[in-house]
Image: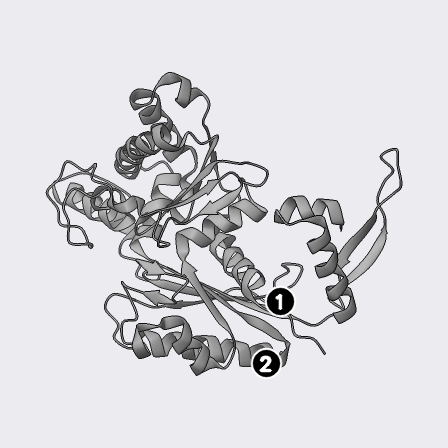
Amino acid sequence: MLTITELSALSHKSIPLVTTIVNDLITDGYVVEYGLAPSTGGRRALTYLLNKEKPNYIVAVAMDQLVTKFVIYDLLNDKQDLVKMMPLDLANDEDALHKLIRFIEENIALSGIPEGQFLGIGIGMPGFMNAEQGINHSFFKNADGGNVRDHLTAAIGLPVYIDNDSSLIAMAELKFGMAKGYKDVMVVNIGWGIGLGMIINGIQFRGHSGYAGEFSHIPVSQSNKLCSCGKRGCLEVDTSLWALVERAEAEMAGGAESSLKRLFTDETKLRGDHFLDAAKAGDPLAVSVLSDAAFLIGKGLSTLIHIMNPNLIVLSGRGAIAGKIITAPIQQAINEFCIARLADQTEIKVSKLAHDSELLGAAALVIENCEFEHP
């Protein structure tokens, strides 16, 4: 429950505008008056709450290069069922777009919720993309006219909003997670690539054309490996989960002992997840490989700290479950490569939203973009 003044501060909108919006939402039944706020010495303000009886739902879809997740939220961010998952290789499956559509449609049908009660579908996806135009330049190039958003909207029959996965993870951290209440934050998405979301003065920063945050492709690697972007020297070639698995396999082929030899025989789980499990369990090879990658990520972050001077860095995404194993070498690199005054003023925290971060960001994307229907 919040007052008009609190809503104004959180939304960065004027009190008259927030008052008008809240009154419209009360008229439409989405918001109810809850009661008076505690006294602060003057007239007690009214507080407002979302109406639990109003049946409106949001479809949230979180994609990475290999796995797609689906869940339905209500307006209070409560899940209506367990998260559904589907293997989907975006880079190599030519039918990926059609499989995504079927996956969403089938799970909406299984929910039993009438389509008229959905506000829309929010989708986070990897790739070099322009969310405003609805175009993903890395994947789904077979969408009509190249516009993935409009293609999905037409196919499914519900409003679809898309954004980069790292941007949505940053949005989730800003609204619900570690970045809440902070002004200047960098949110690092550690996974099959190394993404970045930037929050400046409490607002998410996207850059002139919406492409800000391509942290994976800053040239800090000393290797000559070719990156997926076609360039050499990118951070991603030495720090992505794919790269870590590849290095661990090479080390084992050279005679190194590791529990990964056994874990990698289990094909019911992705090798990257096996790698992270081994690191968390203290496997020496996995810890060593992951620590080296984290140090390089910290070196890249050191450059950005000198430019942005954030008060917080949030480590999020799939790789964040490693916790202290990545935090320590990242901090070590920052201490080594950053001016001490800047390093000392930058906190590092591990996300507590875990695997829900992108899903929550996708749900928030719908709320920020949809238009509530008047009866």
Residue 114 appears anywhere in the view = no
Tell me where residue 251 appears, x and y as whole percent.
16, 41
Tell me where residue 101 appears, x and y as whole percent.
41, 77
The residue lying toward the viewer, choosing from 189 and 149, is 149
The residue lying toward the viewer, choosing from 240 and 312, is 312
Residue 313 appears anywhere in the view = yes
Mark 2, residue position = 115
- Count of numbered badges drawn on the protein: 2
**Residue 339 higher or lower than 72, as above or below:** above
- What residue is at 44 percent from the left and 20 percent from the top? 344
The residue lying toward the viewer, choosing from 226 and 24, is 24
| SS at circle 1 | loop
Q: Quadrant of residue 180?
A: top right
Tell me where residue 205 appears, x and y as whole percent.
44, 46
- What residue is at 54 percent from the left and 45 percent from the top? 174
Tell me where residue 220 appears, x and y as whole percent.
21, 36
- What residue is at 42 percent from the left and 60 percent from the top? 163
Q: Amino acid at mark 2?
A: Glu
Mark 1, residue position = 80
**Residue 325 higher or lower than 188, as above or below:** above
Q: Which mark is residue 308?
A: none
